Structures are given as C-alpha cells and as structure tokens.
Image (tube, helix red, strand yellow):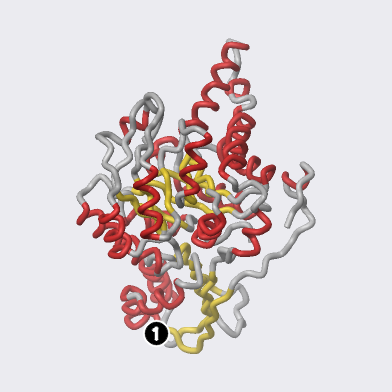
Amino acid sequence: MPLVDMKDMLQHAYDHGYAVGALDLVSLEFLEGILAAAERARAPVILSLAESHFEYFDFELMLPAVEAAAKRASVPVAIHLDHGASIESAVRAIKSGCNGVMVDASHTDFGENVRVTKRVVETAHACGMPVEGELGYVPGVEGEDAERHPGEVAYTTLAEAKAYVERTGVDFLAVSIGTVHGHMKGKPKLDYQRLKQINEALAIPLVIHGGSGLSDDQFRRLITNGVAKINYFTALADVAGTCIRANARADRTSSYTGLMKNVQEAISAEVESRMRLWGSAGRAAEVLTRCRSWMPVEHLIIYNVEDADETRVEIMMAEGRRVLGGIPGVREVVTGKAVQQDAKYRYTWLVRFCHPAVIDNYRRHPDHVAFADRMFRPLAGERISIDFQTVETIFSVRSHHDMAGGERR
C-alpha cells in the first residue's frame, strides 16, 4: 500500500492545507536519507528523479531501487519524473516505475507548451497517471542549475494559466512567481497576489520549483495560497557537500566510505525539518486511508498453437515482446513454454501493466490489434486469459525499518 496514487496524495494535501516534498535524489544516500526522514516524521513523500540529473546515475538501474524502497516503506510514497525532456521521456518513466510525470516545455512559447503537454497528458492519463505541467519559466541563478535552466524569469499569468489547464488537462500546475532553481541572490520577492489569483481560478494543486533558499514564512504563505508540492534539491546537495568537505578536513587520508560518513544523516535531517515546516509531518496514516494504492496488473494468457512448428512460435513471441513492450503503460512482456511435456497448455504470455487503466488502452492500441490479428490469433488455438493484481504476501523476514524499531504495515 505505501506506493500510492500521486493525484490522491496531492489532492489531500491541497484540501487540507499542507505541502508534500518532492525531493530530488541522485544516489542511494539521498534515497535512504529521504525515506528515513519520512518514516520519522510520519509524512507522505514524493521521490523525484529529474532528467537533468541523469548524468549522475543510470535511470534504469536507479528506478528498481527507488521502487523497492517505496514498496517497503510504511508511509505513503509516490515516484515522479521531474523535468522530463520529451514525450519519449514520459513513456520511459512510466515503463520504468514512475507513477507521476512532468515533461517540461515551459521554455517554449505558449502554443508549443500546450501541444507537448497535452500529448503527455493523453498518454499518461491512459495509464492512470497524473501529469504536472509548468507555465512561466523558473530560471537558475547560481551553480549547476544556472547552466541547466538558463535565461530570465517569466512569470505565470492568470489568463494563460486558465487557458493552459483547460487545453491540456494537467492535474497539477508548476507556477513561476519569483523563485529560482539553485542558489538565490539575496531574498527572493514572491508575487503572492499572482499566486492567490491563480489558485482561486484553477482550484488544483499548485507546485513550486526552486524551493531551496526560501524563508519559513515564505513557505507558509505559499502553502496558504494553494501550493501542495514543493520541489527541493539544492539545499540537500549543499548539506551533503558540507558533510563531505568536513570529513575530508577531519581526515585527509579518508577513503570513499570515510568521506561519505554521516552524509545520509545530514540529508535526512534537512528533509525532516522541511516536512515539519510544510505541514506534512504526522499525516501518513490519514493519507494512507484516503489514497488508492498503486498496484500493477498482470495480464496472463496460457494457450496452445495449431499447425505451427517451434520456430514459427518463437518468431511470433519475439515479435510480440518487441511490439507489445513498446505500448505506453506496458512495463514488461514475458513469454514462456511449459516445462512438462504433457501440460494441458504449452505456452504463456505475461504482460505487466503499470495500472488497471492500461487494460482497455492496451486492448484498443493499434500495435496490439495489428499484432494479435496478424500473428497471434492465427496461431493460438485454445487459450485462457486473465487480468489480475498480486495479493501481497507478508514474509517473516524483517525489514531494516522493523529492526530499527519502526512500525510495519
């Protein structure tokens, strides 16, 4: 259950006047530190992976670890693609295990932003997944984020925000009201009146990018005016860097493990302080009762073939893995053959969907229809199919969290 529907999570935050942290992670130290903080604070959390950070880690290798950590948590967790570069990025994120996506076209003109975002929404919604859009432009000021987000600030206007949400169907909107990515020069001046007007007009969860460097009072005023998701990375990277430099000064001969000592704890302490400030601490149990669980669906077919040799069957299955595996919302396609020679059914397909919403979309998808009509049905005779969700089994092996004294659901 702890891996939950992100739209439900943020709607709860919006309705109850608090914000959920979307914490960007770039390593296992970040992942474990963020989740340890969420467990201590009993807070919902969004594990965020920004495409602009993919040079620091392999996305396909990182996602299984993130997903495993989310599933074993006792607090509600969502996994989000942040600042995706294209529709292909969104499809890749859905396939890899994210359950919320953002493809950032805010640097383009209004019409192009709408076109790109609408296409992402159509794809993601068919997979049961919410989408974050961004309107206006939040630049970077100092450090690496100045390079990743060049240019000048462009404020979100009320008229364009209304038109953008209506035309795209986004579930959440990231707004530009004076924050920046990275470090800030001086105290930021935020346009609360603009934010208030947008919130009153849209009545959907709003998002702030560039949360690092804001004061406690600024955060509170943002949340009061509809901000339900706060993106936060630079401050986490800063506390990690400070810890590493302190370790290096303390022992100039430190190995990697010595340099990384207490980094996870430093990140975790910063995350916990933000969760308590943003009002998400202590909300875990309530959110878990209000959110739908995020559970994959297994589409299973067992079948026999008529008048076909093994070679032809293997060609058909290989083509199916290639074609069906490319349909949005399909996470995995596995084909197999019975071990027992006298089995009633000789062959099987196991297609893993990210969400029940994919079932109908998959059946109607032109790639699936063409493959089934051209290659599968002409060969497959007697067959049985079923769509099912796994009934989770609780094992006696205790998790790291259990051994640390935490409650396990």
Question: In this rendering, does residue 334 appear at all?
Answer: no
Nearest the viewer among 291 and 303 is 291
- In this rendering, is residue 354 above or below 388? above
Q: Which residue is mark 1?
A: 377
> For this rendering, which residue is in front, 101 or 346?
101
Q: How many marks?
A: 1
Figure quadrant of the C terminus: bottom right
Residue 30 in the image: x percent, y percent? 56, 37
Residue 221 x %, y %: 48, 43
Density class for disc 1 (Cα within 10 Å; few <14, some 14-19, many ≥20) is few
Q: Is residue 258 left or right of residue 121?
A: right
User: Who's the residue at 32% across and 81% down the image?
Assistant: 374
- The location of residue 144, given as percent across then percent down, is 37, 29
Instruction: Name the kind of residue labelled 1 in the image.
Output: Arg
Image side of residue 397 versus residue 150, left or right:
right
Please identify the quarter of the rendering in which residue 400 is found.
top right
Q: Is residue 229 above or below residue 201?
A: above
Image quadrant containing the N terminus: bottom right
- Give residue 325's position: percent from left, percent from top: 41, 65
98, above or below 257, in the image? below
User: In terms of secondary structure, where does tag 1 sit?
Assistant: loop
Name the residue furthest front: 193
Q: Nearer the viewer, residue 191 or 89?
A: 191
Please state if 364 lies on the left or on the right of 261 as rendered: left
Q: Is residue 39 visible in this depiction of the protein?
A: yes
User: In the image, is 143 to the left or to the right of 284?
Assistant: left
Q: Residue at x 43, y 61 (%)?
A: 130
- Which picture quadrant has residue 342? bottom right
